[in-house]
């Protein structure tokens, strides 16, 4: 849609047919801010309402989605009952919005993707589906894509190709691109489906205090040693749920047995077993034997991989959407300002380096989390590295100061980036409780200069609401005045 808006002839080629099932469903505050910025910058007015729950429901109530007020984490010991935890040491709740109207969303991809395709066509993009591409031939001034449709040969002469076909997708296969290793990340597998009739946690158990948001209206993570279960609720009665686990744990759970493996896993987690006691899988289970991936090459003379095609780490922390939307924003800027210029390929190479650097930074963080799934206080503290970077980045961008946060997870920040790298190295070799305690203290020290969300407040006992005073107290960290923060809050709809 953006390239079409920029006046170039555009064709969208689809291997399958919409609507279709796919996962990768949970947005984040940074994702929605990037989506809103792109819609504004390139006049995609039909897309803009999708950036918030309230405007989505107002404009597109027929497009299914889920309400995401934050990130919910519970820790479990497989096979044991969850013990009462008044200090909340086995849970972590991080709010992302103060109320539903400006909340984030889970994208029910069958509806969402089909809507995007229709909008692309409305803007004049040529759309051809059920195309089986087989070959790319590069020429001096253009390239040719060859394949089949309806059993007949079909070809396209193109100036540039953007590959959005996912990990190990079209260009990776036909160009036989090499793979690169994701640093610090274990080999993992996944098993997932969509379900109906999944009970809500807040209807099964009550908290002695009111949590910062309804715990089910979130990206819900159930953590155990060696893996975790995700749950995302949609407003059409369906729930996306699945498990990601290290190869060792996947073998113990026998994830390759599909539905039987899922049922066995639930019996080891009493709270989830009750939650799914009346649930029904609405589609066959999908077992992914190799979850992570990174291409060693991200662009060529006449092509570039979107971040979603260049690599994937893990669903943990919902990093896929912001990574890809950052990539879309960068590629759009390159095409807008340097198409057919002498700077085009130089900027493409920079895009490739940024894409790989951000995938690697994500890998180190998620790898550190996997290494500490049995030590939930450490896991929770490491998670704050993500939430501190994400909330700082969102605030900087809303203040129109993107230069303060140009990279994902702030990995390029001159102080926070190296400090985060060292902390994640230490997280992989904790031998004593004192090692863990020291690491947690040092994590809080590292995030404090960037903490605009009150994440360093120990009195909150792992429940972090959206508190207006946190932002006002932290105005100097983003070089802002009290009035500028007030304008930011007014502009983003904070007051409802």
Image (cartoon, rainbow, N blue to C red):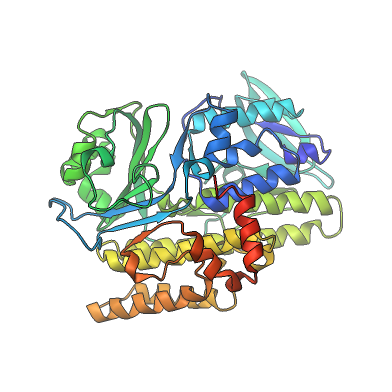
> Image point 57% across, 44% down: which residue?
173
Question: Considering only vertical position in the picture, is 469 above or below 159?
Answer: below
> Residue 363's x, y, as percent?
46, 61
* Residue 145 can be seen, yes or no: yes
Question: Considering only vertical position in the picture, is 352 above or below 495?
Answer: below
- In the depicted view, which residue is nearer to us: 79 or 478? 478
Q: Farthest residue to the left: give it.
A: 80
Dividing the picture into quarters, in which one does residue 271 lie? top left
Query: Does residue 132 appear left or right of residue 400 in this picture?
Result: left
- In the depicted view, which residue is nearer to us: 177 or 363? 363
Q: In which quarter of the image is the N terminus?
A: top right
Query: Does residue 70 appear left or right of residue 280 in this picture?
Result: right
> Residue 128's x, y, as percent?
67, 25
> Residue 135's x, y, as percent?
66, 37
* Residue 364 can be seen, yes or no: no
Dividing the picture into quarters, in which one does residue 58 lie? top right
> Image point 16% across, 46% down: which residue?
268
> Image point 75% across, 39% down: which residue?
43
> Residue 486's x, y, as percent?
62, 59
């Amino acid at each position: 849609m953006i390239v079409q808006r920029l006046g170039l002839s555009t064709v969208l080629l689809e291997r399958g047919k919409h609507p279709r099932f796919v996962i990768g469903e949970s947005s984040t505050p940074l994702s929605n801010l990037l989506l809103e910025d792109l819609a504004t910058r390139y006049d995609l007015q039909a897309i803009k309402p999708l950036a918030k729950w309230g405007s989505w429901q107002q404009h597109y109530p027929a497009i299914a989605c889920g309400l995401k007020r934050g990130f919910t984490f519970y820790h479990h010991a497989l096979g044991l009952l969850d013990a009462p935890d008044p200090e909340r040491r086995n849970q972590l709740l991080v709010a992302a919005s103060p109320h539903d109207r400006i909340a984030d969303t889970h994208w029910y991809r069958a509806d969402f993707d089909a809507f995007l395709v229709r909008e692309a066509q409305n803007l004049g993009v040529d759309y051809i589906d059920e195309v089986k591409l087989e070959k790319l031939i590069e020429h001096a001034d253009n390239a040719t894509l060859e394949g089949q449709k309806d059993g007949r040969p079909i070809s396209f002469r193109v100036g540039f190709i953007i590959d959005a076909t996912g990990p190990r997708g079209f260009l990776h296969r036909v160009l036989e691109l090499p793979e690169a290793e994701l640093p610090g990340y274990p080999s993992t597998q996944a098993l997932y489906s969509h379900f109906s009739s999944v009970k809500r946690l807040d209807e099964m158990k009550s908290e002695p205090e009111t949590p910062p948001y309804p715990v089910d209206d979130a990206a819900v993570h159930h953590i155990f040693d060696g893996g975790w279960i995700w749950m995302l609720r949609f407003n059409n009665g369906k729930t996306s749920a699945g498990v990601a686990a290290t190869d060792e744990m996947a073998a113990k759970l026998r994830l390759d047995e599909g539905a039987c493996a899922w049922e066995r896993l639930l019996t080891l987690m009493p709270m989830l077993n009750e939650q799914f006691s009346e649930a029904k899988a609405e589609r066959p289970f999908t077992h992914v034997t190799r979850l992570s991936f990174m291409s060693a090459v991200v662009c060529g003379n006449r092509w570039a991989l979107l971040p979603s095609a260049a690599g994937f780490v893990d669903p943990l922390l919902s990093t896929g959407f912001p990574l890809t939307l950052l990539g879309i924003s960068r590629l759009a800027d390159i095409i807008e300002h340097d198409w057919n210029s002498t700077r085009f390929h130089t900027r493409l190479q920079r895009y490739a380096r940024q894409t790989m650097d951000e995938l690697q930074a994500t890998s180190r963080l998620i790898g550190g989390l996997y290494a500490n799934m049995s030590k939930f206080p450490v896991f929770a503290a490491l998670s704050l590295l993500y939430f501190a970077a994400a909330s700082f980045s969102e605030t900087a961008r809303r203040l129109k100061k993107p230069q303060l946060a140009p990279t994902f997870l702030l990995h390029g920040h001159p102080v926070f980036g190296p400090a985060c790298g060292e902390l994640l190295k230490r997280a992989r070799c904790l031998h004593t409780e004192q090692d863990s305690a020291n690491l947690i203290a040092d994590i809080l020290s590292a995030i404090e200069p960037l903490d605009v969300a009150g994440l360093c407040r120990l009195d909150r006992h792992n429940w972090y609401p959206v508190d207006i005073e946190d932002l006002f107290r932290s105005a100097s960290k983003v070089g802002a005045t009290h009035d500028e923060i007030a304008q930011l809050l007014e502009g983003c709809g904070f007051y409802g």
